Amino acid sequence: MSNIIVLYKSKYGFTKRYAEWIASDLKADLCEVSEVTARALDKYSTVVFGGSLYINRLSGINTLLKYQRRLIDKKIIIFTCGLSDPNNERAQKELKMQYAKKSPVFWQGTLICSICGEASIMRS
């Protein structure tokens, strides 16, 4: 069993595809975020979460936030899929600030990165 889990929320399949690639490369476990349990998260030291951005809202993040007390001591990495510029630090900061109001401890040290475009053309 891996000490890394990759969670995702995907509407059209692009985020799921990225999550699968990331999990494969990291030899991590993979799970749709709505299917994960609090107890299952206890097994992992690193949680990678991927969701789509819709009007500056990250899909699936509220499900993850309900487990925030269990995640405080874990490494959290968040990736987003959408048409936003992956190098736009301002957009990443705004996203982090938006959710930091709900859960300030959870977001300290969390890494956020964006993936731009369609999964089918991003990796061969």
Image (tube, rainbow, N blue to C red):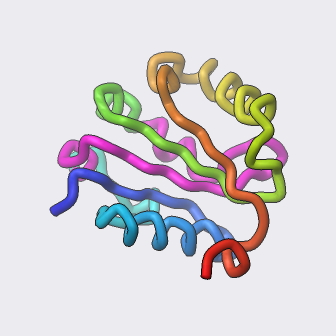
Closer-to-camera residue (100/62): 100
The magenta stretch spans residue 6: no
On screen, residue 97 above or below 87: above
Is residue 28 shown left or right of residue 34? left
Q: Nearer the viewer, residue 47 or 116?
A: 116
- Residue at point 74% right, 51% down? 53
Front residue of this view, candidates 89 and 76: 89
Rendering coords of residue 65 (x, y %): 48, 36
The image quadrant where one finds the N terminus is bottom left
Residue 91 place in picture, x, y as percent:
79, 35
Q: Residue at x 52, y 22 (%)?
A: 103
Number of callouts: 0
Residue shown at the point (46%, 72%) measured from the top left: 20
> What's the magenta region?
40-66
Task: Please give left or right for residue 75 compared with residue 109 in the image.
Answer: left
Using residue 37 as the reference point, say whether residue 43 is left or right of it: left
* Above-or-below relation of 63 to 52: above
Q: Position of residue 29 (x, y in %)?
A: 30, 64
Q: Quadrant of the C terminus?
A: bottom right
Residue 87, how many percent across, how many down? Answer: 76, 42
x 68%, y 49%: residue? 114
